[in-house]
Image: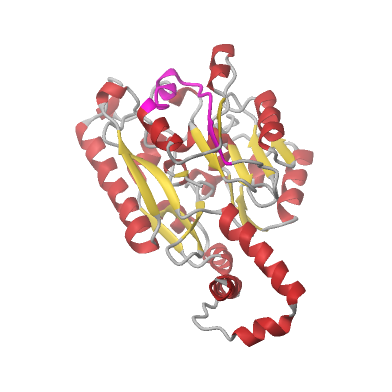
Amino acid sequence: MVLAVVRRITAKTDVAKGIVTANIDLKEVVWRGAVRLIKDFWHFMCDVLEASTNEVLMVAPTAFGFNDQAAEDNHFMHSSTSTSSGKPGGSMTHKALAEFAGLHYELTEVAGVRVSLFQHSLEHGTPDAVFPNNWFTTHPAGEAAGGVRESTLALYPLKCPNRQMERRGDIVEVLRARGYGRLWDMSAAEKQGAFFEGTGVLVLDRVNGVAYVNLSERADADLARQWVDRMGYKELVTFRTVDPAGADVYHTNVMMAIGSDVAVVCAQAVPDAAERAHLLERLRRHHTVVEITNEQMGAMCGNILELEDGRGLPVLAMSTQAHNAFTPEQRAVLRRHVAGLHHAPLDNIEYIGGGGVRCSLAELF
């Protein structure tokens, strides 16, 4: 057990230097001394077990379509003639399914990520169901530097009525069967017109217990404070963002992402200088920060997610559009902190649905 842990620690450390080491001399570790070994083990426990997971939930876009309700404030969406009636167009849905299949293959067969897969139908009336991360999150005991006292399944209040229907009882029961010690259902806030859309609005530093929230119609400030207090997180960092046209950015996870020790953020989308400086300062305490432009944000460079691959090493999942929009220098920085960049084209889902790879993945801890 100890040898396995040491091997994974060493592999993770070497990946940060751009090297993957297959073998290790245990004597070298012993000579570091007990104190160093304990520190390495603690960082391993935090970084690998809390910052990222090897298992996600996905919903295939079997009834995908342009969502008129969501388009009211999601300016990353674009309508299509095939969905002018508000119903999924056959060819568009087929394209979305083909893209989804490519992403599923890249994650499961190439990266070794475990996927719990669901689907939806026209009867559900949920054209955006392919983005399940907005309506639930899961949290292991010990997350946020020990602040999360028991494993938790949280359900969230969503702004759009047809997105509220994504909280399907059958999926909730499957999630509850995983044995979480606490179920926290925040969805009653919908009746008061207050919304807080999961890891769409929450970008989490799960290791250090910092929650980053871009306040918007979908991210209520009071609910953000309530979430941090009740979940046991240490700090809440809030700000507001706008796109180049001056419209509010609807979700936090399209403008920033956080991994074990690297973060991506579109700081230029934060117009308030004090908020922008505080955001960058807080991120830089624990992470190497890759700043992206508004144009890169539009290409979904912020909508990426760190996962644990089949070897137990951190990798980044993103769309091919996002991968190609990062500069070579930015990709080099990312690769110094993870074992690989896994991407698949999601052009139709991103263009019509206004969300990318991160939106398509709900982490299971």
Q: Does 70 sit left or right of 257 as displayed? A: left
Task: Give me the residue at 53% from left, 45% from top.
Answer: 297
351 is higher (above) or lower (below) than 215: below
Q: Does 161 sit left or right of 10 as displayed? A: left
Q: Would residue 126 be visible to someone looking at this image?
A: yes
Q: Would residue 60 be visible to someone looking at this image?
A: no
Residue 60 image point, x, y percent: 31, 40
Image quarter in which the N terminus is found: bottom right
Residue 313 image point, x, y percent: 51, 65
159, 345: nearer the viewer = 159
144, 224: nearer the viewer = 144
Residue 253 image point, x, y percent: 55, 41
39, 325: nearer the viewer = 39
Q: Quadrant of residue 82?
A: top left
Q: Which residues are magenta?
A: 151-169
Q: Quadrant of residue 263?
A: bottom right
Residue furthest to the top: 191
Number of residue marks: 0
Task: Give me the residue at 51% from left, 25% from top.
Answer: 73
Residue 135 image point, x, y percent: 48, 31
Q: Does 108 sit left or right of 357 as displayed? A: left
Magenta span includes 352 = no
Task: Give me the residue at 57% from left, 15% from top.
Answer: 193
Task: Give me the residue at 42% from left, 63% from top.
Answer: 310
Magenta span includes 159 = yes
